[in-house]
Image (cartoon, helix red, strand yellow):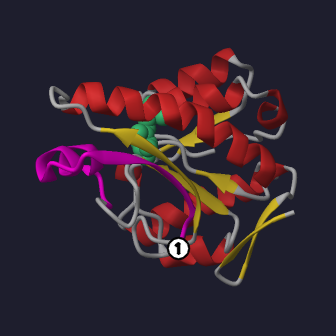
Amino acid sequence: MLASGSGTNLQALIEAPEVSSHIRVVVSDRPEAAALGKARDAGIETAVVPWSDHPDRASFSVALADLVEEAGAKGVVLAGFMRVLSADFVERFSGRILNIHPSLLPAFPGARAVEGALGHGVKVTGVTVHFVEEAVDTGPIVAQRAVEVLPDDTVDTLHRRIQVEEHRLYPRVVAAFVNGALTLEGRRVVWS
Ligand code: GRF
């Protein structure tokens, strides 16, 4: 599990019994990430791979991939991880990396998805869970949930309602993933 921030999605995954026992390690690029505290409170192993300790994305990603593999993890779940992984990392865990994004992809990729949706005046946005490919916020879409944009919404109020949906959706998808009921064959998402 990789996380950079507050870790509310991580918390939802920790609270899902079908998921939590499968979490081998929670890794962050930021030692101060609140997500690490949530993992420690749940008795889950944590590690930090500081972004600033590495000269480039490639060496950062190698350190991260080595750590994930040494922990015995077979897949990688991104839960608010704010660094772009190298092509080599994605290749090494090909078809085994999931991400959650706060918009209905392919609309509003990138770090400012909620701002983007508000700025464009869309009436509906939402949540996307997808397998990770090299390019940011692309990759086969696994599941989506719509969230209505209200006339008085701010980035905060809208993001909060999006997160309610994230916390419902991600544990269900990740449970299927860790149980082998959700796989990627080529670019095809397969539920079994
Ligand atoms: C979520 O909105 C997720 O969609 C995005 O980053 C945010 C992480 O929030 N990738 P949290 O750290 O899980 O609270």
Quarter assignment of residue 16: top right
Q: Nearer the viewer, residue 154 or 99?
A: 154
Position of residue 128 relative to residue 192, above or below, is above
Q: Quadrant of the C terminus?
A: bottom right
**Amino acid type at mark 1:** Glu
**Horizontal side, residue 183 vs residue 46: left or right:** right
- Residue ID at (70%, 65%): 96
Q: Identify whether 35 is placed above or below 189.
A: above
Question: Horizontal and vertical percent for residue 65?
Answer: 63, 62
**Horizontal placement of 130 versus 137: left or right?**
right
Figure quadrant of the N terminus:
top right
Residue 55 belongs to magenta span: no
Start and end of the magenta stretch?
109-132
Establish whether ligand 1 lies closer than 8 Å to the Cβ of label 1: no
The crowd level at tag 1 (other Cα within 10 Å; few <14, some 14-19, many 20+) is many
Residue 5 visible in the picture: no
Drawn side of residue 122 relative to residue 39, left or right:
left
Between residues 182 and 19, which one lies in front from this camera angle?
Answer: 182
Residue under pointer 1: 133
- The structure residue drawn at horizontal position 20% and vertical position 29%, both measured from the top left corner, is 153
Residue 95 position in % (x across, y down): 68, 71
Residue 11 % position (x, y): 60, 25
- Left of 74 or right of it: where is 94? left
Q: Residue at x 77, y 54 (%)?
A: 177
Q: Residue most toward the top?
A: 41
As helix, strand or loop, the secondary structure at mark 1 comes to loop
Q: Nearer the viewer, residue 73 or 94?
A: 94
